[in-house]
Amino acid sequence: MPWCETCAKFWNPTSMPPDGTCPTCGAQIGDPPDTSVPWHFWLLVAGLVIYLGWRYLQGIQWLMGEGMAWLAALIVAATVGATAWWAARRFRRSV
């Protein structure tokens, strides 16, 4: 834990500003905390997206097999519409 000689106080790295200075006096007391996301989190997210996509396809196939093609078409249309709306909002903000 970073120690500030001027304030005579220990500081938790997460309570310090991003530049590693003392919140009270502004002296440089430590390295900036690492705020990056670990690689295994993104691996978990990728696995979750693949799993949920597969379950979505299985649900559509099940609806088609049960004779509810109209409901499957409605769900697919809603998914495509929601994805198009999300993409339009996201790309409009970034431009």
Image (cartoon, rainbow, N blue to C red):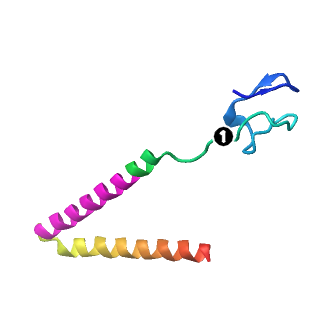
Q: Is residue 2 above or below residue 16?
A: above
Q: Residue at x 29, y 73 (%)?
A: 76
Q: Is residue 55 magenta?
A: yes
Figure quadrant of the C terminus: bottom right
The residue indicated by pointer 1 is: 33
Name the spot of residue 34 as percent of width and height, x first.
62, 42
Residue type indicated by callout 1: Pro
Q: Is residue 83 left or right of residue 92?
A: left
Q: Residue at x 44, y 51 (%)?
A: 42
Quadrant assignment, res 77: bottom left
Figure quadrant of the N terminus: top right
Quadrant assignment, res 72: bottom left
Q: Is residue 22 magenta?
A: no
Residue range highlighted in magenta? 45-65
Choose between 67 and 76: the one closer to the eye.
Answer: 76
Q: Main secondary structure of the magenta part?
A: helix
Count the marks: how many? Answer: 1
Q: Is residue 58 left or right of residue 28?
A: left
Name the spot of residue 23 as percent of width and height, x first.
81, 36
Judged from the image, the secondary structure of the residue bearing numbered disc 1 is loop
Q: Residue at x 21, y 62 (%)?
A: 59
Using a 10 Å C-alpha cutoff, classify the residue at mark 1 as few (fewer than 14 neighbours), some (14 to 19) or many (20 or more): some
Q: Is residue 66 left or right of residue 25?
A: left
Choose between 70 and 95: the one closer to the eye.
Answer: 95
Q: Residue at x 29, y 61 (%)?
A: 53
Q: Is residue 33 above or below residue 9?
A: below
Name the spot of residue 46 as percent of width and height, x first.
37, 55
Name the spot of residue 67 as percent of width and height, x first.
12, 71
